[in-house]
C-alpha cells in the first residue's frame, strides 16, 4: 500500500474511538440532567421554591409584550 491508499482498519479504529467518546459525552450529559432534575424536583423546601420560581418566570415571560414607544404607530 502507498501512503494515499485508504486503510480500512485505521478508519475502523478511528470510528471506534469516536463512538466511545460520544458515548462518554452522552453519559456525562445524562448524569448532568439527572442532577439538575433532582435539584429542581426535590421535595425539600428549596426544590419547591425552585419549581415555584420557574413557574413564575414562565408566566412572566408569556405575559410580557414589547412596550410601544410614544411615537410608534
Image (spheres, grey):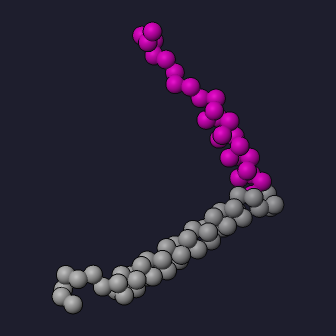
Q: In this view, does 3 lie above or below 73?
A: below
Q: Does the magenta stretch include residue 62?
A: yes
Residue 15 drawn at (x, y percent): 42, 79
Q: How many marks?
A: 0
Q: In this view, does 1 lie to the left or right of 14?
A: left
Q: Is residue 37 magenta?
A: no
Residue 5 drawn at (x, y percent): 23, 83
Residue 67 drawn at (x, y percent): 52, 21
Q: In this view, does 14 lie to the left or right of 46?
A: left
Q: In this view, does 2 lie above or below 23?
A: below
Highlighted range, magenta:
47-73
Find residue 63 and report its image quarter. top right
Q: Is residue 41 left or right of residue 31?
A: right
Q: Which residue is drawn at 52% across and 25% down?
A: 66
State which quarter of the image contains the N terminus. Answer: bottom left
Q: Which residue is drawn at 78% across and 54% down?
A: 48
Q: Nearer the viewer, residue 46 or 33?
A: 33
Q: Which residue is drawn at 45% across and 9% down?
A: 73
Q: Main secondary structure of the magenta part?
A: helix
Q: Is residue 61 left or right of residue 9?
A: right
In the image, farthest residue toward the bottom: 1
Q: Residue at x 56, y 25 (%)?
A: 65
Amino acid at each position: 500500500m502507498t501512503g494515499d491508499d485508504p486503510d480500512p482498519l485505521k478508519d475502523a479504529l478511528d470510528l471506534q474511538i469516536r463512538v466511545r467518546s460520544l458515548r462518554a459525552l452522552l453519559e456525562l450529559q445524562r448524569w448532568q440532567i439527572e442532577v439538575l432534575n433532582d435539584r429542581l424536583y426535590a421535595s425539600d423546601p428549596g426544590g419547591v421554591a425552585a419549581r415555584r420560581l420557574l413557574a413564575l418566570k414562565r408566566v412572566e415571560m408569556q405575559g410580557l409584550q414589547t412596550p410601544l414607544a410614544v411615537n410608534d404607530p
